[in-house]
Image (tube, rainbow, N blue to C red):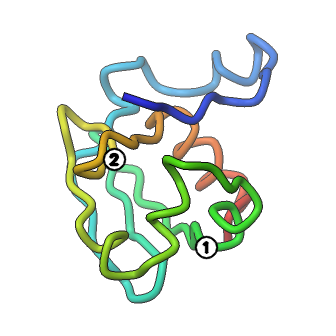
């Protein structure tokens, strides 16, 4: 699977996050377009609009997700945001983005 890597973060920044097992997602909800509501296993809920990021990070794995019909086929695989063609996004990345409002 192809994963989006977390930009280099200081260990202090990552130390403020819950343990790795709690950073995984427990549920997702489509909000329309490329927006998602994400619930993490520790109860944290965040909303992200991934369209700006997908538009900027063009590539053979992410380009299909620009089509809303493909994007809406998202599912969770052991707490990881995943699509059927093998693309996934690391839940720690999503958590940092949601906390920082990075993709909104």
Q: Are marks 2 and 1 in contact (CB under 8 Å)?
A: no
Classify 4 as above or below 28: above
Classify 10 Å Cα crowding around label 2: few (below 14), some (14-19), many (20 and above): many
Q: Look at mark 2 in the image and give the residue it sits on.
A: 81
Residue sitting at the far top: 11
Classify 41 as above or below 7: below
Classify 5 as above or below 51: above
x, y (%) of residue 24? 33, 34
x, y (%) of residue 5? 62, 28
Q: Cα distance, mark 2 to mark 1?
A: 15 Å
Q: Could you tell whether 52 is left or right of 3 in the image? A: right
- The secondary structure type at the circle numbered 1 is helix
Quarter of image, res 88 = top left
x, y (%) of residue 6? 66, 29
Q: Quadrant of the C terminus?
A: bottom right
Q: Tell me the residue at 19%/38% (across/down).
A: 77
Residue sitting at the far front: 60
Q: Tell me the residue at 44%/37% (across/down).
A: 91
Quarter of image, res 31 = bottom left
Q: Tell me the residue at 41%/51% (across/down).
A: 44
x, y (%) of residue 93? 58, 38
Relative to the observer, which residue lies in front, 4 or 45? 4
Q: Tell me the residue at 49%/47% (across/down).
A: 61
Q: Could you tell whether 67 is left or right of 49 in the image? A: left
Q: Look at mark 1 in the image and give the residue it sits on.
A: 51
Relative to the observer, which residue lies in front, 12 or 59? 59
Classify 10 Å Cα crowding around label 1: few (below 14), some (14-19), many (20 and above): some
Classify 33 as above or below 67: below
- The secondary structure type at the circle numbered 2 is strand
Q: Quadrant of the N terminus?
A: top left
């Amino acid at each position: 699977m192809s994963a989006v890597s977390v930009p280099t973060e200081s260990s202090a920044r990552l130390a403020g996050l819950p343990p790795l097992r709690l950073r995984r997602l427990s549920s997702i909800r489509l909000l329309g377009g490329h927006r998602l509501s994400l619930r993490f296993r520790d109860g944290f809920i965040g909303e992200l609009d991934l369209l700006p990021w997908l538009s900027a990070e063009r590539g053979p794995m992410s380009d299909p997700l620009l089509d809303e019909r493909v994007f809406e086929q998202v599912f969770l695989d052991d707490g990881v945001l995943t699509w059927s063609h093998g693309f996934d996004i690391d839940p720690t990345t999503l958590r940092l983005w949601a906390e920082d409002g990075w993709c909104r």
